[in-house]
Image (cartoon, rainbow, N blue to C red):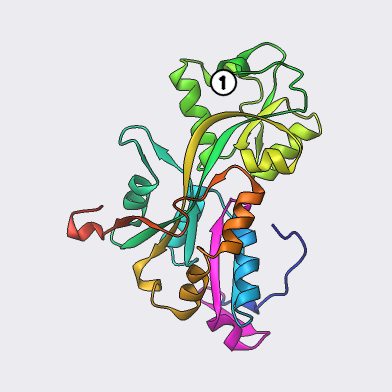
Amino acid sequence: FRTEMIPADGAANRLSLMDTVLVKLLDDPKKLYNTVVLAGCSPALSLWARAAERWHPELRVHLTFANSMTALERLCRGEVHIAGMHLYCPQTREHNTPFVHRVLKDKAAVLINLGVWEEGILVQPGNPKRLKTIADLAQPGVTIVNREQGSGSRELLERKLQEEKISFTAVQGFDQIVNGHQDVALAVATGKADAGVSSASIATAFGLEFIPLHQSRYDLVILKQYLEEAPVQQLLGTLGHRQVISQLQALGGYDTNLTGEVVATVEAATNGKHN
């Protein structure tokens, strides 16, 4: 993810005593019409966005960091065109779809797969604490970092601890929160924590060892009303390109067999059904 400052599209001023914001545009309005706003947490999103911009010079992909639930809520509020997510529902044994149906309610959407990625425990090179399972995180002398509420990594950690009947309070550092996969990796790499839950691709990027826990489907959620918009079509049209696939494979930890495929559709709740 880019960390440098990005030029603003406009300067905003909120009118006093009114729920109204006046915006003075600072750039060509045509750029706004050719912008796709994308929220998510996977590092593969930035690779995809940059590749799409190279193929379509007039296209701009505005990528913002958000955990799975926050991205979905932003989509519901109309703040983004596409939300990336990786949440698993143990009751239905489905990835993402139950959450989309619950949050979007009266909005129809499609879920397009970005990749199936490996999630698990990041540990320091050489695995000095000899961690092997989720239960080992409750050992004395082991400290972790955790993710914020609404993230797929936190959901996975909590679910695996509950399966082992381990209290959250038994894990030192459970309330030590960082935001983002890279922050988890940095905490482990710098010795601030012994372990944290993230993805295999992040472990590879930071030179960390990895203990797999779950194969998670990372999907892109798009409202059906956006599918016919030209910039969205341009972006989605690049997803199955061999250069994007090769970058996902080079990143590591991604199964690309489903990449670019529609894996689920969610109808508006008023129809009383979803797929």
Asked whether, in this view, residue 100 is left or right of residue 232, the answer is left
Who's the residue at 75% across and 28% down the image? 124
Say if 128 sits above or below 220 in the image: above
Q: Which image quarter: residue 127? A: top right
From the top left corner, tell me how far across and down residue 215 is, in percent: 49, 37
Judging depth in this view, the residue of 54 and 83 nearest the camera is: 54
Q: Which image quarter: residue 16? A: bottom right
Residue at the left extreme, as displayed: 272
Quarter of the figure that contains the N terminus: bottom right
Q: Dot 1, crowdedness within 10 Å: few (<14), some or many (≥20)?
A: some
Give the extent of the magenta segment.
Answer: 16-43
Q: Secondary structure at mark 1?
A: helix
Say if 125 sits above or below 82 in the image: above
Residue at label 1?
134
| Amino acid marked by disc 1 | Ile
From the top left corner, tell me how far across and down residue 48 is, in percent: 60, 62
Q: Say whether residue 2 is magenta.
A: no
Who's the residue at 59% across and 70% down the image? 52
